[in-house]
Image: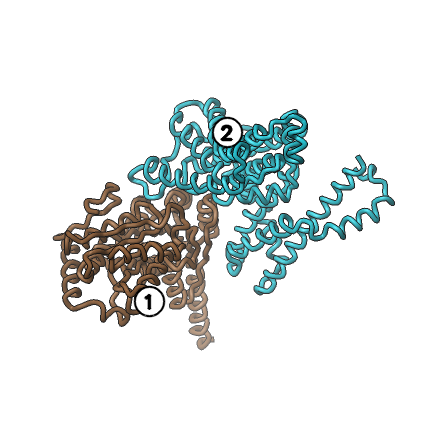
Amino acid sequence: MKRLIPIILTTGIVIWSTSLAMAFKPAVLFDMGGKFDKSFNEGIWNGLEKFRKETGIKYREFEVRQEAQREQFLRKLASRGSDPILAVGFGQADAVAKVAKEFPNTRFSIIDVGWLDAPNIQGIAFKEHEGSFLVGVLAAMKSKTGKVGFVGGMDIPLIHKFACGYVQGVKHINSGTTVFQKMTGTTPAAWSDPARGAQLAKTMYDSGADIVYAAAGSTGLGVLQAAADNKKLSIGVDSNQNHIQPGSVLTSMLKRVDVAAYQVFKSAQDGTWESGVKILGLAEEGVGWALDEHNSNLVSSAMKSKVGQVRKDIISGKISVHDYMSNNKCPVN
Amino acid sequence: MKESRTNNIIVTLITTTNLLVAFIISGIVIWSLGEDPWFALKTMLYGAFGYEEGLGYTLYYTTNFIFTGLAFAVCFHCGLFNIGAEGQAYIGGMAVGLICLWFENWPLLLVFPLAVVVSIIFGGLWGAIPGYLKGRHGSHEVVTTIMFNFIASVVMVYLLSHVLRPPEKMSPESRVFAEKVWIPQMHEIFDWFGIIITQTPLNGTFFFALVCLFLVWRFIWYTRWGYELRTVGTSESAAIYAGINVSRNIVIAMTIGGGLSGFVGINEIMGSSHRIMLNFQEGIGFTGIAVSLIGRNHPLGILLASLLFGILYQGGAELSFEVQSIDRHMVVLIQGLVILFAGALENLFRPQIENIVKHFLPKINVTKLF
């Protein structure tokens, strides 16, 4: 009997701990783009998959198709006991605010939203303008023609924020540099139109630009392709896109949504999850620029040290980058 | 009389057969994914009907499809293929939203009729312009209405991202209206009678949609205008010979169609989201085409077909939620198969079914069946 006690105890503990692990039921609500959008949602998905592989904990997921489904399925997830619930994209903000009130014991995290304030909501926003400033610096230093370009996705304030940061970075190095700016479209289709992206980039290259920065979802893939075809340079966005067209992608502006998503689940699991707004900028490594074997030949050591200096100055506050969304205006064009 | 009853039987049988084939093929696809098709079907039906919340969402989607389905049907009876319901709903909805923003201190009893009128005016105008271009200049309505969808989309994007968006808000959408002008939701209406039901976006607009079904039915088959409209649709030259003004009828049909589409805005904006949003009408207008075709352009058929698509939307979403290996693309596939078989390939089994019906019908007394 005495020998049995430790066995019973250990089995008990094992069962108890697995039931604890079972009790941790994270969930994610993807936005309209769907989890395989090769961009924003997919970045989140990558981060969550990493979490799943590391911990073996499965998560529930749903891809929203209708506006009304946001609230419906947030509520459904919460009432089924999912916790934490990660909502993807600013489109979910109102639904999260409402449902979070109904389920005060469920933790909600939302990415790309920095304005919700509730004891069980964690908002995660990024300083895209800071990351864009850095790639703007790189573009201005690399450009031989004194002309660079920007191709945005859908014409919304968030993308103007990218553009404005980029232009500020370019003008910081050389105020005489011309920046061509184009938005792909005014509907969500603008996020997934590589042919149009290639066309817009081609026009800019023909007008003398030699580097084009694309912040346009999968439309940007067309920009990268056009750069490779025309022997010019491009700049990727969100995830590291340097490998897509090796040798012609100058760098990529990184927005680490995957890290953020991973952190949400991880912190909720180990109990360090906190409500409130987390704004991830250069200092928090939430944004940055990509340097790897695919673009190391394109970035000179002078560029590296300059952009390193600028990065430090932004973090220390010596350079302040204007956020377009603070007043819907950009000081430079 | 007997002839039309036989015809009704044939049409019902054809639609049922087509739906059955669509569901069988969907079942095969689900089975090949390694899931149990029976379980999928049960989940879908339970999700759509099985509990109050599911039913509420189903009927909420149904309401939208009734409006766009009718919008297509009215034009179809006039021989027009109106694929501009998206744009008409968009502009009509914008007008509804603006009324709610401007008159949010007025009582709902005044704002609601006002919203109905402006959605008819704006949605109707968005239909009337292509109608005029068709009636006067012969521009094909398929081309013009789809172009007007794009124009509507661009106008709305401009308004929402530059004019209506409050500066502190990130999404391109207007602020939320005062609660006074919200259409009472179904759980509130039931609450007046002391019945408690779950809260869903289903709202009073549902009853308005039923009224519209009835009015369209009366209009098309029991008024002189409806008669003229159908004459133009059946034979334009006969209509001219009979002294009917064809271009005027085309404009009227398109205006009514546009106005009906505009009512989507009442359900979506005034009844559910309470703010003007980007793409609130997305897909509803185009689904209306399928709804109307499957429902044989008859209000009763449209009601049933709207319900079918309500089930597919709500039940499909439940399915992809419950069965994680079935994602939303699978649900779109099922919807696509329904449209393909019940809409596009409607005559696939017609000869066989006609033969069967004609073979058996003389032996049974039809009048007793109905």
Within 10 Å of the Cα at label 1, are there few (<14), some (14-19), or many (20+) other Cα atoms? many
Mark 1, mark 2: which one is toward the viewer?
A: 1
Q: Is residue B354 above or below residue B173?
A: below
Q: Nearer the viewer, residue B1 or B80?
A: B80
Question: In the rendered view, would you say B21 is above or below A186?
Answer: below
Q: Amino acid at mark 2?
A: Ile
Which quarter of the image is occupied by the C terminus of chain B? top right
Rendered hue of chain B is cyan
Q: Give the x, y percent position of residue A315.
A: 17, 56
Query: Residue A59: horizontal and vertical position, in percent?
Result: 44, 60
Quarter occupied by residue A130: bottom left
Q: Is residue A210 above or below residue B242?
A: below
The colour of chain A is brown
Image quarter of the N terminus of chain B: top right
Give the side of residue A101 with respect to residue B189, left or right: left
Determine the secondary structure under disc 2.
Answer: helix
| Chain identity of mark 1 | A
Residue corresponding to mark 2: B120
Residue occupied by mark 1: A245
| Residue A188 coordinates in the image, percent (x, y) | 40, 49
